[in-house]
Image (cartoon, rainbow, N blue to C red):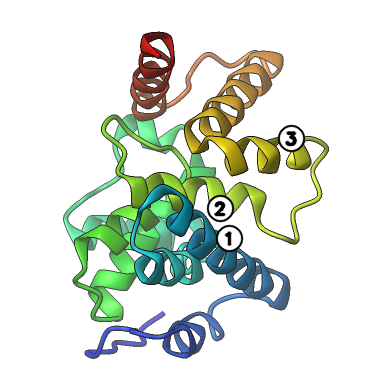
């Protein structure tokens, strides 16, 4: 996928031009919905609404790249997948998305790149913008999973509570699969969130 673009996308339409050739219609629609949710959440938590919208539009740009292409992008970007990353191919597209946007689309804004990178795992020290995109990805208008209304309700009151709820669901789902290999970045973020909650 070589679509080198020197001028970074600065508007929603710019982002659409980047992702339209890369994504099927349902994933394109998802990206639009995440952009809307991220922009609204950003206003609520005091993050940059424009950057949240841009990151929401772009977050899944590498979603349908073949796994080996995702891996190669990360290596070319200088952030190769770790052994731990390699155990969870479903998260690779987030890391590859950061790489693709930086290498092929001229994106230099580190806040946007970081929001794309961490939208699946989170990490210790999550910024408002990063958490906004993480949660927006889960409450966007087209989402229909069983607990989505609960997550939307939590997000409307307290974005951290929504994040905790989702992370605990992820842990439970992994346990049901007999897995005990949740990403250490996710665990670090969860510890931070629950410590904050205990302190209030």
Q: Secondary structure at mark 3?
A: helix
Q: Position of residue 165 (x, y in %)?
A: 60, 26
At 34% from the left and 46% from the top, the residue drawn is 128
User: Quick one: quadrant of the C terminus?
Assistant: top left
**Marks 3 and 2, how far apart in space?**
14 Å
Q: Residues within 10 Å of mark 2 (few under 14, many from 20)?
A: many
* Residue highlighted by disc 2: 136
Q: Position of residue 16 (x, y in %)?
A: 51, 85
Which mark is first along the chain, 1 or 3? Answer: 1
Q: Residues within 10 Å of mark 1 (few under 14, many from 20)?
A: many
Is there a contact, CB below 8 Å, between mark 1 and mark 2? yes
157 lies above or below 132: above
The front one of 42 and 69 is 42
At 41% from the left and 72% from the top, the residue drawn is 54
Q: Position of residue 179 (x, y in %)?
A: 58, 16
Is there a contact, CB below 8 Å, between mark 3 and mark 1? no
Q: Residues within 10 Å of mark 3 (few under 14, many from 20)?
A: few
Q: Which mark is residue 150?
A: 3
Q: Secondary structure at mark 2?
A: helix
User: Quick one: quadrant of the N terminus?
Assistant: bottom left
Q: Secondary structure at mark 1?
A: helix
**Marks 1 and 2, how far apart in space?**
5 Å
* Residue highlighted by disc 1: 37
The front one of 147 and 74 is 147
Does residue 162 appear in the picture of this structure?
A: yes
Which mark is first along the chain, 2 or 1? Answer: 1
Is there a contact, CB below 8 Å, between mark 3 and mark 2? no
């Amino acid at each position: 996928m070589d679509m080198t673009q020197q001028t970074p996308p600065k508007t929603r339409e710019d982002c659409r031009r980047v992702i339209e050739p890369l994504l099927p219609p349902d994933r394109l629609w998802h990206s639009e919905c995440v952009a809307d949710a991220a922009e609204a959440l950003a206003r609520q938590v005091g993050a940059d609404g424009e950057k949240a919208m841009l990151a929401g539009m772009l977050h899944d740009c590498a979603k349908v790249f073949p796994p080996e292409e995702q891996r190669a992008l990360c290596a070319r970007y200088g952030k190769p997948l770790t052994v731990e990353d390699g155990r969870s191919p479903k998260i690779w597209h987030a890391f590859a998305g950061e790489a693709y946007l930086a290498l092929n689309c001229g994106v230099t804004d580190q806040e946007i790149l970081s929001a794309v990178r961490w939208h699946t795992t989170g990490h210790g020290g999550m910024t408002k913008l990063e958490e906004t995109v993480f949660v927006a990805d889960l409450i966007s208008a087209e989402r229909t999973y069983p607990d989505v209304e609960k997550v939307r309700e939590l997000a409307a009151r307290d974005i951290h509570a929504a994040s905790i709820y989702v992370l605990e669901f992820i842990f439970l789902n992994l346990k049901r699969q007999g897995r005990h290999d949740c990403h250490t970045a996710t665990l670090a973020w969860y510890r931070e969130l629950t410590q904050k909650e205990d302190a209030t």
